[in-house]
Image (cartoon, rainbow, N blue to C red):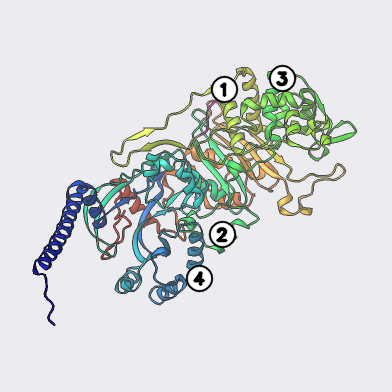
Amino acid sequence: MTELRNIEADLSRFRGRILAASVVVLACFALLAARLVWLQVVRHDELAEQAEANRTAIVPIVPNRGLIVDRNGIVLASNYSAYTLEIQPSRLDRPLDQVIEELGHIIEIQARDKRRFRKLQEESKSIDSIPIRTKLSDEEVARFAAQRFRFPGVDIKARLFRNYPWGELASHVIGYIGRINLAEKRQIEEWPEEEQANYRGTEYIGKLGVEQSFEKTLHGTTGVEQVETSAGGRAVRKLASSAATPGNTVVLSIDIKLQRLVEDMYGERRGALVALDPKSGEVLAFVSKPTFDPNLFVDGIDSENWAMLNDSIDKPLLNRALRGTYPPGSTYKPFMALGALTTGKRSATQVIMDGGSWSFGGHVFRSHGDTGLGPVDLHASIVKSSNVYYYSLANEMGVDLMHDFMKPLGFGQITGIDIFGEVRGVLPSQEWKRNYYRRPEQKRWYAGETISLGIGQGYNSFTMLQLAQATAVLANDGVKHRPHLVIATQDALTRQRVPVPREQPETLPLKPDHMALVRKAMVGVTQGGTSTRVFAGAGYLSGGKTGTAQAVTIGQREKYNATKLEEHQRDHSLYIAFAPAEDPKIVIAAVVENAGFGAAHAAPIARRIFDYWLLNQYPSEEDLAAVRKGLAAAPIGKPRLASEVGWPPAVPGVLPPAAAASAAAAAAASPQKLTPALPVAAVSRPPTP
């Protein structure tokens, strides 16, 4: 039986379905249209910016670091460009060790390179680009460029490296730069936003010396560059850029030829020397021996060299002029004499009988060789270096009066020199001892402890910088200048030199006639006292004071015998001096560690410095050899004209002098330029600084 269909009902259902489908289709088109309007109109600017960001990259342009030069314009720190092979661990597609092994088949990677890489990796984030090899040759660059497609996350970059052309010379003054570690990154994150922005892309920072204390002056201003990138993230072309501004040149007060002369005279001996202009506080020489080569730190020091420097008994990394503290020995006596006059404890004419020893509380304090000098007044006490005179004076003054007089001269105080790391030393007082020691019996000051302070022993412990500043105050009629190493900065673009602002000097309440009496006695030291032989025939008049300071305590019943002591236990040799006597232009404080009598080792160095600075004389090679061995008094051989002594010196292990000089001249002639460290599609020759 055939079923009859309701055609009208079927048509009605069909029309309903068509209508529903049409509504759905229209709704979909409406949604698409709405989405299109939302994306193309409402969010157009935002999405266009994102698209542009995916297509382009904003990369910081690290500025070229400023130069460091001495007072005569000789370049002490410059830059040179080279290629580095760098790995970004977060972008690797296989294990790091495997990548390094495969790279080793293309470019030589030594074990020391791997150790340095691991050390840098510990101090960096995974997104950082870390060098595995530096200073690649053109051949090595070409070999890797041909295989680059095999190593995602590995690239060659053009970097600007710091160069210290004279190697170890003045290394404690100049300092060095190194890769920014995590602790330093955290410090940078606490800086104001503007200063943080200026360090984006920067991987190296000053670590020591002038490089550290004048970091922001030397760093320059970071630029930016907009580049178009490929899907792989490599730069294809440059779209726009804002150039970086090179760091400014820092001009030091140091005379590098004088610095070299002093370091040469020390030879292999340890010690420190500071030479100042007493009328301005400018540091003319700032020597710490032994030194180190700052070039070792530029691209990361390897463990062997670090162990050699850090574990050495001679402590070459210690800046002895800034952080080494020593008992001043008899160089303290002129200041004790000035204190006696100022406080009224002694007159210049008061005579003390020096019988060779002085007893106090059952203890015998000895003099030189237990030989008495007889009756001595203030003048003779300095010229002949009487211990007995100052034993009794210390007892009369007491520790706190000595402390209160010596403190304004700068003993045991921070001088405020313009590099970081200065130590205070110890200027003892009863309060100092109460604060320093813990046990009650140690906190008490005993009267017997005061006696040896008068001859610069006991708890007294000062830096050569402090001793030089105090000598400068005495030579400059009580006017105290803050010592400084940097005298000016020079704009990298305009070449305009701007003097560094200085604090007003302080005038201490000292009587001119008292200072004149002490200076006259110090002149007597060079004319008839302990340094007479050293200054024989000098073309000027100078004042000075020798000193011999104990490195270890000798028993009361024992006599000092250097041959029976280990080298590091022998007495230190010290000398302070000023010249010319009538109008001092230079003062010196020097120590030669464990060398013995001050007149035999430290004073001859001072004589040659004065000859250089005042007479333009440079010692003969024969004389230099004698000074290094402690066998010289007055100069021997014919001195050379300092202005005619050749420069630059030959320095092994760094850029050849001619290359360094030409690089320095090029850097001085025009602002430095360097291709920014970016991923590039092709490798080109690095630019010349």
Whichever of labels 3 and 4 marks the residue nearer the N terminus, that label is 4
Q: Secondary structure at mark 1?
A: loop
Mark sitting earlier along the chain (1/2): 2
The residue pinned by badge 3 equals 348
The residue mark sitting in front, 4 or 2, is 4
The vertical placement of 658 against 604, above or below, is: below
Q: Which residue is mark 4?
A: 111
Give the residue drawn at x 59%, y 60%. Answer: 308
Q: Which residue is mark 1?
A: 477
Of badges 3 and 2, nearer the viewer stands 2
On whether residue 479 falls in the magenta region, the answer is yes
**Residue 551, position in %: x, y?**
73, 45
Quick check: marks 3 and 4 in contact, CB under 8 Å?
no
Element on which disc 3 rests? loop
The stretch of residues the image draws in magenta is 478-483
- Mark 3, other Cα within 10 Å: few <14 / some 14–19 / many ≥20: some
How many angstroms separate mark 4 from mark 2 (CA)?
15 Å
Q: Is residue 222 above or below residue 156?
A: above
| Cα separation between marks 3 and 4 | 69 Å
Closest to the camera, between mark 1 and mark 4, is 4
Left or right: residue 529 versus residue 319 is right
